[in-house]
Image: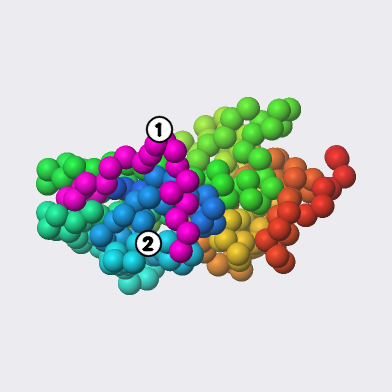
Amino acid sequence: MFDVTSLLPPEFAPPPFEPGWVWIAGAGPGDPGLLTLNTLYGLRTADVVLHDALIDPRVLSLAGPRARVILTGKRGGRASCRQEDICALMVAEARSGRRVLRLKGGDPMMFGRGAEEIFALVAAGIRFRVIPGVSAGLGGLAYAGIPLTCRGVNEAVTFLTGHDIRGRVPELNWEALAQGSPVLVLFMALRNLHAIVPRLLAAGRRPDEAVAFVRNATGPEQEVIETTLDRAVAVAAGVEPPALVVVGEVVRLRATLDWLDPRDGQPRPPAAAP
C-alpha cells in the first residue's frame, strides 16, 4: 500500500508516536480523503486502534499491518461498549507499552466524548495527544451543498446535541436558540425530534422554514432529504441514523450549491446561478 505520509517533507514530519501514549484522533465524517495527515500517520504507526462504530471501513483499512483493530463503538439503543470499559481498555493497552490510537468519528472534542476519555487518561497518568478531525457538522454539510454561513442569509450558526446524558431532550434555552441563531445543526437528534420541533415552533421559528436531513455524511451512501420545519417530524420517521438535522434558510441554497452526484460520488456540472 502506498503510504501518503512518505510525501511529507522533514519540516512537516508528524509528531513522534511514543510507546505507552494514547492519541485521541478524529477520523472525520466518513470520506477517507478528509483524514488529517497526523491521523493517517497514527493509523499507520499504532499498535492498537480502538475505533468507534461509524468509522468508514476504508479508513480502518489504512491501519498498519501489525495493528490490532478493535471495535469499541457506542450506538444508541443497541448493545454497545460501556464508556468506562473503553477508558479502562485505553489505559491498560497504554500501560502495556503499546501505541494506542483512539479513533473517533468526526472531531473527538465535538459531541465525541473526547474530554471524558482524556479525564480517564489524566487520572491514570497516561500521556496523550489530541488530533482534531473534520466534524460531520462541517464536512458533512459541505458535501451536502449546504453552507454553514452565507452573507445576506445568516451571521451565526449553533451546533447542539439532540439528547442529553440520559437520552432526553437537552435542558436548553430553546427560546433563545430559536430566536438567536438563524441556523441550527443538530447531532443525534432523530429520536427526540418530535419534542424539539414543537419547542422551536413555539419560540417563533416559521413552519415553512427549510430543514435538511443529511444521512451518512460524506460516505458513498450519503443522502440528503429536504423538507420544512412543520413536516420535519413526519419525515424523520423514515430517516435511518446516522443523520444530521439542519434547520435554516441556508438549506435552500443547496438548489445551486449541491455539487456531489450520489450516483458516482463525482462533482456535478455547475448549476445555474440563483
Question: Which label was assigned to residue 11?
Answer: 1
Q: Given contact means CB atoms under 8 Å apart, are the residues at marks 2 and 1 in contact?
A: no
Q: In which quarter of the image is residue 157?
A: top right
Instruction: Give the x, y percent position of residue 55.
Output: 44, 61
Check disc 2 and report the residue beneath it.
63
94, 226: nearer the viewer: 94
159, 179: nearer the viewer: 159
Identity of the amino acid at label 2? Ala
Identity of the amino acid at label 1? Glu
Question: Looking at the image, which residue is at 71% across and 28% down?
Answer: 151
Question: Looking at the image, which residue is at 30% across and 60% down?
Answer: 49
Find the residue positioned furthest to the bottom. 79
Q: Is residue 96 left or right of residue 211?
A: left
Instruction: Give the x, y percent position of residue 236.
Output: 60, 62
Type of colouring: rainbow
For discs 2 and 1, the disc positioned in front in the rendered view: 1
Q: In this view, does 55 lie to the left or right of 98?
A: right
Instruction: Give, as a single range, the part of the protein colored magenta.
Output: 1-22
Instruction: Give the x, y percent position of residue 232.
Output: 64, 56
In this rendering, the answer to whether 175 lies above or below 263 is above
Instruction: Give the x, y percent position of residue 39.
Output: 39, 49
Element type at marker 1? helix
- Real-space CA distance between mark 2 and mark 1, rounded to the nearest whole angstrom: 24 Å
